[in-house]
């Protein structure tokens, strides 16, 4: 495996720029997840990204133990479920027990909205608010159960709100990011605030595998389109966490290439082509005039329109 760059978090700790994502498209423990982790660690990956909501933290923990790689050599990220915003410490304890570790390297607020146990979203000003949940997450850093904390699916609007009262600046903001949704403005904001951006769906769910521009760049480098996309992501100083349960793809994903300044610019601008600027994720709803998990796009601070995204 090629040497993977390390990025520096705002607390001085390092995080591998390439990780293995553990959302498998469905919730639940599986031997597929365990095997994926074993293969990834054998290949040299040292960054694992999972979440309570994925329902596979036990399988991730088994994979780590079966690999024989020392826990301290692996950067583990997990996430707080929206249903657990009012029980942050207990939720992390449950995740730690499933993972079989006494700490995580990074604990993220998976979504800004708090949900009831029945899945109903609370309004932004209802308790537990983002600020209240974050305060409990800060305590986990104080006691060492989380080395770093961060957020996921946060916009500039919500980060501004959080930073008004935060004692600890989020180390990471994990969002959907790829050439169809490059998040240029959010990336610039996060860099200004010292927050690293992690890109989920960094290969756009393989929806760009036949894109002519990407295929030309890939052919020039004797690489796959996925390798081009991951190299672009890391080249713009974002962490990328592709998922693959296929050992050959895991190998390919870990082989980064060097893109020219012109190629980086081409990929940065790709979203401006007609019909290209959009989300590839399926969690969007037409309810409330456009929403995700009960909050409107306005409440989330996302510049979205139904069926697409307003170009940056």
Image (spheres, grey):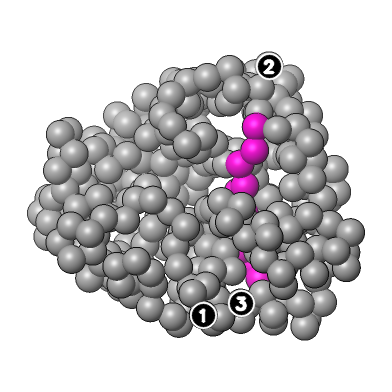
Q: How crowded is mark 3: few (under 14 residues within 10 Å), some or many (20 or more)?
A: some
Q: Give the range drawn in magenta.
A: 235-245
Distance between mark 1 and mark 2 Cα atoms: 47 Å
Q: Which of marks 2 and 3 is in front?
A: 3
Q: Is mark 1 on a helix, strand or loop?
A: loop
**Closer to the camera, 304 or 80?**
304
- Percent position (x, y) of residue 12? 61, 57
Image quadrant for the C terminus? bottom left
Q: Does 310 sit left or right of 20 as displayed?
A: left
Q: Residues within 10 Å of mark 2 (few under 14, many from 20)?
A: some
Eyeballing the image, is 114 above or below 32?
Answer: below
Label of residue 274 in the image: 1
Looking at the image, tell me whether mark 2 or mark 3 is earlier in sequence order: 2
- Percent position (x, y) of residue 119? 18, 39
Snapshot quadrant of residue 292: bottom left
Q: What element carries label 3?
A: helix
**Closer to the camera, 276 or 257?**
276
Residue 113 is one of the magenta-drawn residues: no
Q: What element carries label 2?
A: helix
Looking at the image, tell me whether mark 1 or mark 2 is earlier in sequence order: 2
* Residue drawn where x is 80% and y is 69% of the image: 216
* Residue drawn where x is 62% and y is 47% of the image: 242
Are the residues at dot 2 and dot 3 in contact (C-beta closer than 8 Å)?
no
User: Can the viewer see residue 172?
Assistant: no
* Residue drawn where x is 50% and y is 45% of the image: 106
Q: Does 71 sit left or right of 25 as displayed?
A: right
- The residue that label 3 is drawn on is 270
Eyeballing the image, is 24 above or below 191?
Answer: above
Are the residues at dot 1 and dot 2 in contact (C-beta closer than 8 Å)?
no
Snapshot quadrant of residue 52: top left
């Amino acid at each position: 495996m090629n040497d993977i760059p390390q990025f520096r978090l705002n607390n001085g700790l390092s995080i591998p720029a390439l990780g293995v994502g553990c959302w498998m498209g469905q919730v639940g423990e599986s031997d597929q997840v365990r095997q994926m982790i074993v293969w990834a660690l054998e290949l040299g990956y040292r960054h694992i990204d999972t979440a309570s909501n994925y329902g596979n933290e036990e399988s991730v923990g088994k994979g780590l133990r079966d690999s024989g790689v020392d826990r301290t050599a692996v950067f583990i990220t997990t996430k707080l479920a929206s249903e657990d915003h009012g029980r942050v410490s207990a939720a992390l304890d449950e995740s730690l027990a499933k993972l079989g570790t006494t700490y995580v390297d990074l604990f993220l607020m998976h979504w800004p909205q708090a949900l009831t146990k029945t899945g109903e979203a609370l309004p932004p000003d209802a308790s537990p608010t983002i600020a209240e949940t974050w305060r409990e997450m800060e305590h986990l850093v104080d006691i060492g159960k989380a080395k770093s904390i961060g957020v996921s699916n946060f916009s500039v609007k919500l980060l501004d709100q959080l930073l008004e009262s935060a004692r600890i600046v989020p180390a990471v903001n994990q969002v959907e990011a790829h050439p169809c949704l490059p998040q240029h403005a959010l990336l610039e904001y996060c860099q200004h605030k010292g927050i690293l951006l992690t890109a989920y769906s960094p290969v756009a769910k393989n929806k760009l595998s036949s894109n002519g521009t990407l295929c030309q760049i890939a052919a020039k480098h004797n690489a796959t389109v996925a390798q081009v996309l991951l190299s672009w992501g890391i080249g713009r100083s974002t962490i990328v966490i592709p998922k693959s349960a296929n050992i050959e793809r895991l190998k390919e994903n870990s082989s980064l290439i060097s893109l020219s300044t012109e190629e980086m610019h081409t990929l940065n601008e790709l979203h401006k082509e007609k019909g290209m600027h959009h989300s590839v994720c399926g969690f969007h709803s037409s309810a409330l005039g456009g929403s995700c998990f009960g909050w409107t796009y306005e409440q989330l601070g996302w510049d979205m329109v139904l069926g697409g995204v307003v170009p940056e």
